[in-house]
Image (cartoon, rainbow, N blue to C red):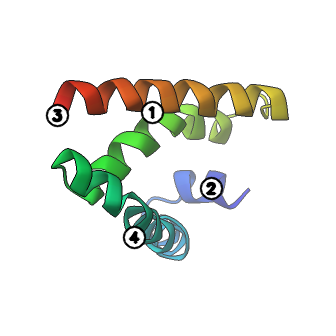
């Protein structure tokens, strides 16, 4: 509900607060996890994090916010994660 409210709120303030409490907290932690992989492949951890999250989430969030996509089942979520991991692995091979 908060994401819907943030999407509809014209000033962007609610979206900023949600981002600071979520994305801006989680992404740096995820980048820390990515650091060894980034070093191994000569990449930037923040860039790898962005790639992976983009593959993992894509446009799913906005589809959920505007209610054109139902909540994923655990099986669907697992399949999406596996697909993102496979695509991410291919991306790393192409970038090395």
Q: Which mark is residue 96?
A: 3
Element under disc 1: helix
Residue position marked by numbered label 4 in the rendering:
28
Q: Pick the residue in front: 77 or 93.
A: 93
Of the two numbered discs 3 and 2 in the rendering, the one whose residue sits closer to the viewer: 3
Label located before the other in sequence (4 or 1): 4
- Cα gap from disc 4 to disc 3, whole angstroms: 23 Å
Rendered image quadrant of residue 88? top left
Asked if marks 1 and 2 touch (Cβ < 8 Å), the reply is: no
Mark 1 highlights which residue? 55
Q: Quadrant of the C terminus?
A: top left
Asked if labels 1 and 4 touch by Cβ distance under 8 angstroms, the answer is no
Dot 2: few (<14), some (14–19), or many (≥20) neighbours within 10 Å? some
Quarter of the picture holding the N terminus: bottom right
Residue 3 image label: 2
- State yes or no: discs 3 and 1 in contact (Cβ < 8 Å): no
Density class for disc 4 (Cα within 10 Å; few <14, some 14-19, many ≥20) is some
Q: Earlier in the sequence, mark 4 or mark 3?
A: 4
Q: Residue at x 56, y 59 (%)?
A: 6
Displayed quadrant of residue 61: top right
Lower position in the chain sequence, tag 1 or tag 2: 2
Q: Secondary structure at mark 2?
A: helix
| Residue 70 visible within the image | yes
Task: Identify the residue at image location x=45%, y=45%.
Answer: 53
Q: For the point 20% across and 55% down, which residue is it? A: 44
Mark 1, other Cα within 10 Å: few <14 / some 14–19 / many ≥20: some
Evaluate if marks 3 and 2 touch, with contact meaning CB atoms under 8 Å apart.
Answer: no
């Amino acid at each position: 509900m908060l994401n819907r409210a943030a999407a509809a709120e014209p000033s962007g303030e609610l979206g900023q607060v949600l981002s600071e409490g979520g994305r801006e907290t989680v992404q740096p932690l995820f980048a820390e996890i990515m650091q060894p992989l980034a070093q191994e492949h000569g990449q930037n951890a923040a860039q790898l994090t962005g790639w992976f999250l983009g593959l993992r989430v894509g446009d799913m969030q906005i589809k959920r916010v505007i209610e054109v996509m139902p909540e994923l089942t655990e099986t669907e979520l697992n399949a999406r994660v596996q697909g993102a991991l496979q695509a991410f692995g291919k991306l790393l091979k192409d970038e090395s």
